[in-house]
Amino acid sequence: YKVWSPPVLGIHGLYINTAKKPFDNVALRKAMNMVVNREDIFNKAEAGYFHPLVTSVTGLPSPAGDAFVAPEYRGQNQSVDVEGAKKVLTGAGFKFNGTTLLDPSGKPVTIKLSDPAGWSDYQTSLEIVKDNLAQIGIAATVEKANQDAWFKNVEEGNFDAVFRWTNGGST
């Protein structure tokens, strides 16, 4: 069978709570983006069904999101760059203690990745992200939350990062 998926701006991705330290640091988020293997998530966790594979550094799908990409990011595709991510981090005051990433205050960088237990595609996505973040010294844990509690925590900002979606169409 062939699946036809019309271009929409419904995005599945990692949503980071930027109100929490150290995730309020742009350099950290940029470095995290540089190591997440979107192709692995697309093929292994989502079995290729969240079309299209998002390749833009912005995280916007093409062609639906093309008109919203700032000129300086047009045509720039995301690719895994662990060494580049480490340079971004050290340039922003992060340090490495062995394989552990320390924030500028000297604390180890940890993150809790959370989604409801029954959401197997998102749980697999989070496991991939966990492994990817380990490459830059971030100790991630994956939590399998109760769905009702998870929604409440997300709505109240009580999370580090979640895999989530946006709805396509008008907002």
Image: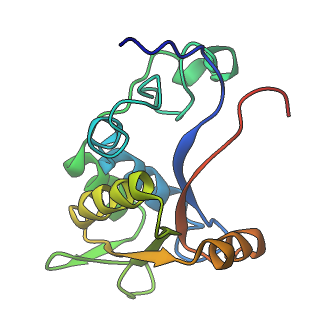
Q: Which residue is drawn at 48% across and 56% down?
A: 29
Q: Position of 116 compared to 95: left or right?
A: right
Nearer to us in this view, 121 or 87: 121
Nearer to us in this view, 164 or 132: 164
Residue 82 in the image: state x and y as whole percent.
22, 50
Q: In which quarter of the image is residue 167?
A: top right
Residue 108 lies, with reference to residue 24, above or below; the image says below
Q: Quadrant of residue 100?
A: bottom left
Residue 101 in the image: state x and y as whole percent.
29, 75
Q: Residue at x 63, y 65 (%)?
A: 18
Q: Quadrant of residue 141?
A: bottom left
Q: Which residue is drawn at 54% across and 42% down?
A: 12
Q: Can residue 160 be seen in this view?
A: yes
Residue 7 in the image: state x and y as whole percent.
60, 16
Q: Position of 169 compared to 72: left or right?
A: right
Residue 96 in the image: state x and y as whole percent.
23, 75
Residue 78 lies, with reference to residue 122, above or below; the image says above
Quadrant occupied by the N terminus? top left
Residue 38 lies, with reference to residue 17, above or below; the image says above
Q: Residue at x 28, y 35 (%)?
A: 43
Quadrant occupied by the C terminus? top right
Nearer to us in this view, 87 or 5: 5
